[in-house]
């Protein structure tokens, strides 16, 4: 754990993560705390907002960027 914490690259990223998820993780895990985005910046990241996510259609015909079926 000490080696991961002292490694400038941080912990390994999951191989199955999308490029958008990897970018979000890279932002969160920046070694230099002054280079890390604020919580507000991270909340506006496309990975969190769903921007850039593929639009899918649900069974009832509604579109949803997360593919959740169009219902709240």
Image (cartoon, rainbow, N blue to C red):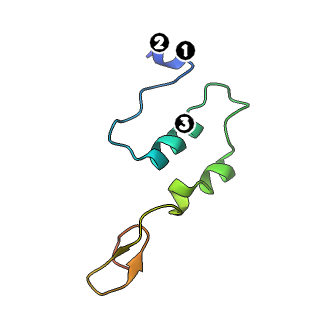
In the displayed structure image, the side of residue 29 where residue 17 appears, left or right: left
Q: Residue at x 45, y 45 (%)?
A: 19
Residue 59, above or below 18: below
The image quadrant that residue 56 belongs to is bottom left
In the displayed structure image, the side of residue 9 where residue 42 appears, left or right: right
Structural crowding at the residue carrying mark 1, measured as other residues with C-alpha within 10 Å and reported as few (<14), some (14–19) or many (≥20): few
Q: Kindly identify which residue carries mark 1.
A: 6
Report the quarter where the N terminus lies. Answer: top left
Q: Residue furthest left?
A: 59
Residue 20, above or below 65: above
User: Would residue 44 be seen by someone viewing this image from the given angle?
Assistant: yes
Residue 25 locus on image (x, y percent): 51, 39
Q: Kindly identify which residue carries mark 3.
A: 26
Residue 2 locus on image (x, y percent): 48, 13
Distance between the alpha carbons at the discs numbered 2 and 1? 5 Å
Q: Kindly identify which residue carries mark 2.
A: 3
User: Would residue 72 be seen by someone viewing this image from the given angle?
Assistant: no
Q: Mark 3 and 1 residues: CB-CB less than 8 Å, in contact?
A: no
Tally of numbered discs = 3
Q: Element at badge 2?
A: helix
Structural crowding at the residue carrying mark 3, measured as other residues with C-alpha within 10 Å and reported as few (<14), some (14–19) or many (≥20): some
Distance between the alpha carbons at the discs numbered 3 and 1? 15 Å
Report the quarter where the C terminus lies. Answer: bottom left
């Amino acid at each position: 754990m000490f080696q991961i914490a002292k490694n400038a690259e941080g912990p390994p990223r999951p191989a199955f993560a999308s490029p958008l998820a990897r970018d979000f993780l890279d932002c969160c895990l920046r070694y230099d705390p002054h280079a890390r985005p604020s919580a507000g910046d991270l909340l506006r990241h496309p990975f969190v907002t769903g921007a850039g996510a593929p639009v899918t259609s649900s069974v009832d015909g509604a579109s949803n960027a997360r593919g959740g079926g169009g219902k709240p």
